[in-house]
Amino acid sequence: MNWDGFLVDGLPFLIFMIGTIILTALITWLLMRQRYRSLLAKYEQKLGEFNDLQNRYNVLLGKYEGLEGKYGKLETEWKELNLKYEQQLALLNDCKNKRTELESEVVLIRPFRQKYEGLLPIHEEKLGLIDNQVVQIKDLETRATGLEDALRGERDHGKKLAIEVSTLTSNLNAAKELAAKTDGLLKANNVLKGEVDRLNLLVDRGTAAGGSAGATGGSADTAALEARIAELEDQLGDARKLAAKVDGLIRANNILKGELDQVANMSKDEETAVLDRVKKRAGQLNMGRIGTATFQDKQDLKKIKGIGPFIEKKLNALDILTFRQIANFTEEDEENVTDAIEFFPGRIQRDQWVPQARGFLNMETKAKPAPSKQDATLERIKLRAQEVNFGRIGTATAADKDDLKRIKGIGPFIEKKLNSIGIFTFLQISKFTPEDEDKVNEVIEFFPGRIRRDEWARQAAGFAKE
């Protein structure tokens, strides 16, 4: 073999082949490396998915185990329900048997049912009438309860009136006796007048037989008769005065009877209407002279003879609440109050309300203890009432009083403070402006800003609509 020729001619080819092999290997290695990286990325992706699936598997396995436990419970419950179903099925079969029996009985009952259905409209009509009667009875019971309360309250007043009626009846009987005597005197007076006329006629004629002696005797008889007539005329004047007094007693007696009948027959609505009517007349009273008072000052005016529960309500409707106010009455005030409360004339003077009130006032002054700290506070606050703008929030009286303690933030003492300055109703508080809230807060010596914070105006507006 000729190696030199081979080396000269075959070496480049060999080198080419070796380069080709190396290049092919390099390209193959690069391709394999790229493929490896791609497969590695897919592997990592699949590994992540596998891990996710493994986690989901674990979760589902836990749910499966939980469901398996629930399945066991449901299987137990199903067995129990199946047992109950079999029991209910047995009952249903029994019911079907009973239904068959009842259907047989229904065939027998059907004629009675038809008769009942014919009577049903009549019974329903009667039930409707009964329901209406029940409603009427309940309404009557309510009114009866109201009347019973009113009559119970008027019992003492009725006793007083009964005593007065008894006294007036005695006076009336005495007056009737005097009237009978007066009739007798009138008849005697008429007889005497006839005799006087007859004697005067005889004197005027003058008889010849009588002479001067007869004339003298006639004059003496005439003088005696005239004196007797004058005496009888005086008695007649007294009798007429007594008859006028009797007429007054009769009228007073009739008024008392009318008042008793009115109180006994008055319903709650009628009583309210009377009090509203009386309240409208409050403007005709001189409260500057009589004096003002609040609900906290209210005294038991029924202690005064002649004032019963209903008369006291009428006086309260006029804002007359204390003995001091009645003690300040003048004759003009007595007449105005008599007219305002629709009382019969002269009753206040005759029962001497003013002296009685002054007596009670003196008794209270002697027995009155030193004012408490709370009373002193209320008196101090009351003096500042004029600082509140009542032109904006409106005025009210103790008769209009609402339960202000329903408002959150108002207790019993705060309510007394508000009442002492003339604030009695939800409507007044509902009209508070921020300025009113600050002023009332200051006047009643309350914590600053408390009225606004507790929203008194908003709460009061809700209660006022009820």
Image: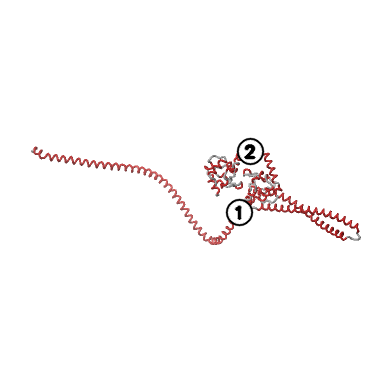
Q: Which mark is residue 13?
A: none
Disc 2 is placed on an element classified as loop
Tell me if 346 is positioned left or right of 400 in this view: right
x and y, in percent, of residue 397 in the image = 61, 47
Amino acid type assigned to the residue bearing label 1 in the image: Asp
List x then y, in percent, for residue 351: 71, 47
Residue 415 spot, x, y in % from top left: 58, 43
Name the quadrant containing residue 444: top right
Of badges 2 and 1, nearer the viewer stands: 2
| Of 111 and 127, the residue lying toward us | 127
- Residue at x-position 89% and y-position 57%: 215
Vertical position of residue 386 compared to residue 217: above or below: above
- Front-lying residue, 321 or 405: 321
- Residue 346 image position (x, y, % from top left): 70, 50
* Label 1 element class: helix
Is residue 70 visible in the rendered structure shown here?
yes
Q: Quadrant of residue 324?
A: top right
How far, Cα to Cα, is label 2 from label 1? 47 Å
Applied colour scheme = secondary structure
- Which is more N-terminal, label 1 or label 2? 1
Quarter of the picture containing the N terminus is top left
Q: Disc 2 marks which residue?
A: 371
Q: Which residue is mark 1?
A: 139
**Looking at numbered disc 2 in the image, what kind of residue is underneath it?**
Pro
Residue 345 or residue 460, whichever sits in front: 345
Comparing 223 with 342, the one in front is 223
Q: Is residue 30 above or below residue 109?
A: above
